[in-house]
Image (spheres, helix red, strand yellow):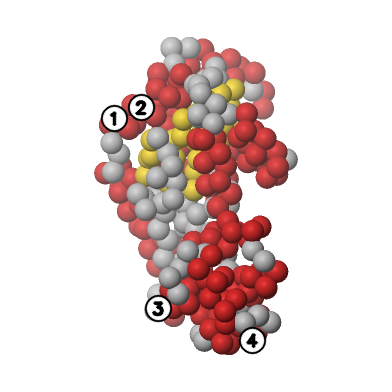
Amino acid sequence: MSPVLKPTTDLANRIALVYPSLSDAHRRAADFVLQNPLDTATMTIDGLAERSGTSTATVTRFVRALGYGGYGELRSALSSALKLAMAPVDGLADARAAAGSTFATLVTALKDQSANLEEAISTLDEGVCSRSIDALLQSRRIFLVGSGASHYVASYLEEGLALYLDANVIFAASRGGAERAIRYMMSAGPGDLVIAVSMPRYSRGTLDLTRLAKSRGALVLALTDAPTSPLASVADMTLFAPARNRMLPNSPSATFALADAIITAVARERPDAVEALKELSESLLWTFHQ
């Protein structure tokens, strides 16, 4: 069975952008490409026209509607999208084929995460860090956005920041699905901060919500893996944490560490942080196992 084109790829994003304005014939071509990217990547323009029930002229106009110069560019984009989608599968297959014990796999994985963390430390910029913490301390509301593994990093941030900040901390992407998240972002504006978390393969939903809040005047702090991340071009401030993993699509360990560091820095800057932690500890006294 041919893999379905992932919504995180550039080609899928282009199709989604123009789809509402496409004719019925163009939509048939779009639907076929989305559902059969592997087949399309190896087809001639005549083959795509025949399989999608359209014509070569229709396919040509569809390709141009996507912003490509010709059918060859569309096939190149498909090849790139498929390479992105299949990279974790290929990595897992290569790792399984390599000689080594289960113990060696565990050690290698931990060393890789250690390298991610060291790189995260080396890429920190003092000015960006200071502006980020100042924004957290000064914002009236803080919206958190993240999906997949990034969802759990955002959830961790929500719990930690809510303890030490007076601001209303809202995990927009976790309450009531996409429609509710959009309503939260539409309420964002000047004086608010959005913390967007995204690792490869990047979530289109996270990017769209972040752009929506940014367009309404909210400040954006991105936690992502590299300057090439689509979030980096949207954010006002970006903190980087590599998410490389030889066998999996990504690893959130360095991003979790970065989130923990952010919470720690916020707590240090709050003069009442000790008292807040004391009150929490006293209220939870009888829930701890000694």
Q: CA distance from mark 2 to mark 1?
A: 6 Å
Q: Position of residue 141 (x, y in %)?
A: 56, 24
> Does 214 appear above or below 21?
above
Which residue is drawn at the image coordinates 57% and 79% (left, top)?
57
> Which residue occupies 73% across, 40% down?
176
SS at badge 1:
helix
Query: In terms of depth relative to the viewer, which is nearer, 267 or 132?
Result: 132
Judge the density around disc 3: few (<14), some (14-19), many (≥20) Cα neighbours within 10 Å. few
Q: Residues within 10 Å of mark 2 (few under 14, many from 20)?
A: some
- How much space separates mark 2 and mark 4, taking CA atoms? 56 Å
Which mark is in front, 3 or 4?
4
* Left or right of 88, for residue 133: left
Give residue 98's mark. 3
Q: How many angstroms separate mark 3 from mark 4 (CA)?
A: 43 Å
User: Looking at numbered disc 1 in the image, what kind of residue is underneath it?
Assistant: Gly
Q: Secondary structure at mark 2?
A: helix
- Could you say whether the residue bearing mark 4 is in a helix, strand or loop? helix
Tag nearer the camera, 3 or 1: 1
Residue 199 visible in the snapshot: yes
Sequence-earlier tag: 3 or 4: 4
Which corner quadrant of the image does residue 286 belong to? top right
- Mark 2–mark 4 CB contact (< 8 Å): no
Amino acid type, residue under disc 2 in the picture: Arg
Q: Return the disc, 2 or 4, that comes first in the chain's sequence.
A: 4
Q: Where residue 51 appears, x then y in whole percent?
A: 65, 84
* Residue under the image location 32 percent in, 32 percent down: 128
Q: Quick one: label 3 or label 1, which is nearer the N terminus?
A: 3
- Residue with the mark numbered 4: 50
Q: Nearer the viewer, residue 262 or 169?
A: 169
Q: Residue at x 58, y 49 (%)?
A: 205
